[in-house]
Image (cartoon, rainbow, N blue to C red):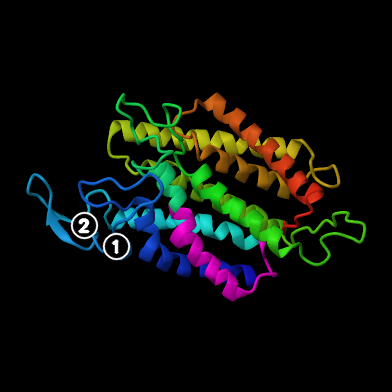
Amino acid sequence: MNVLLKNILDVCAGAIGFYLFGYAFAFGHRPNERSNAFIGDWNFALSYTTEVGRDDSGVRFDGLPGQGWHSWLFQWALCAVATCIVSGAVAERCALPAYLAYAFFLSAFVYPVVVHWVWSPQGWLSAFNMSRDGYALILRTGAIDFAGAGVVHMTGGMAALMGAWVIGPRIGRFDASGKVNEMRGHSATLVVMGTFLLWFGFYGFIPGANLTIGTKVGATIVSRAAVTATLSAASAGLLALLGRFGASGGWDVVRGCHGCLAGLVAMCAGAAVVEPWAAILCGAGAAGVFVGAEYVVLHKMKIGEPK
């Protein structure tokens, strides 16, 4: 019930925060002007989206071209994903008023600023922010993050890590000597079912990041993203499962599920540009990073998270 309520707060408080401030900080700029490279500064509370005007050719439009109602809804969905990542890391040991404040602040300011850096044409990391010679400002390519491996998942993950570190582990996570006590989930059936639901949802999350499928090029990109996401998830799940990383050294279905999700998250960045064989390697790398990071965070840093 505690985690479920936090997820409701993520969606509700996040929607209001993203509506009032977040969308403007992420993408807002005055018509025919550029925002700064750090943060957007226009269209708060969708004030410009609700206006009616005409474009340069005299065609009537509702709101700022390219930043209409559909754009806000899709971007809010990504914001909700970043926000809800934290709920599991602080489960059962965070006051709900404090969590409400966190959900609003992350959705209204923290996450949108990162979005502006990478996805806004004016962001300092953006692959769309071109210099005079036609190349992106950073390393001539910019940060390529097709579906939010860094923008969405890393932002939410770092917030979760900081939250778990500040609040501390749940009671019983470590014994008197500091040794980790295994706290297994109560239902492997629900874990597997949730994994397949998330995997299915990623087919909207990753291919959908292309924002269009109505052209031959768009259909090709969407198709490639779906295939590479599948291969990355599969290889990561196999490595996590066959590597026998579980505490007992045997088959661990939950660890296999974790690997699949790690592969999907990793492929969010380059799903539209990598080759299928490279997606398999990316998934394998994601499983290794997941296992290594878990060991460091839990056993070395003593930051206890619920499994």
**The N terminus: image quadrant:** bottom right
Q: Which residues are magenta?
A: 89-112
Q: Which callout, 2 or 1, points at the residue further toward the start of the chain? A: 1
In the visual, does 243 lie left or right of 138? right
Mark 2, secondary structure of its residue: loop
Q: Which mark is residue 296?
A: none
- Could you say which quadrant of the image residue 305 lies in? bottom right
Q: Magenta region's main secondary structure?
A: helix
Q: Nearer the viewer, residue 163 or 271?
A: 163
Mark 1, secondary structure of its residue: helix
Residue that appears at 74% across and 62% down = 168
- How far apart marks 2 and 1 lie (CA) works out to 9 Å
Does the image show residue 73? no
Residue that appears at 46% across and 38% down = 145
Q: Position of residue 217 (x, y in %)?
A: 32, 31
- Could you say which quadrant of the image residue 261 lies in? top right
Residue that appears at 66% across and 39% down = 237
Tell me the kind of residue under disc 1.
Answer: Leu
The residue under label 2 is: 63
**In the image, residue 138 above or below residue 190:** above
Pointers 2 and 1 in contact (CB under 8 A)?
A: yes
Q: Magenta segment: does it hold 163?
A: no
Q: Nearer the viewer, residue 275 or 22?
A: 22
Q: Position of residue 299 (x, y in %)?
A: 81, 49
Tell how many labels: 2
Q: Which mark is residue 46?
A: 1
**In the image, residue 125 above or below residue 52:** above
Q: Position of residue 134 (x, y in %)?
A: 31, 26
Tell me the kind of residue under disc 2.
Answer: Gly
Q: Rate crowding at label 1 as few (under 14), some (14 to 19) or many (20 or more) other CA atoms within 10 Å.
A: many
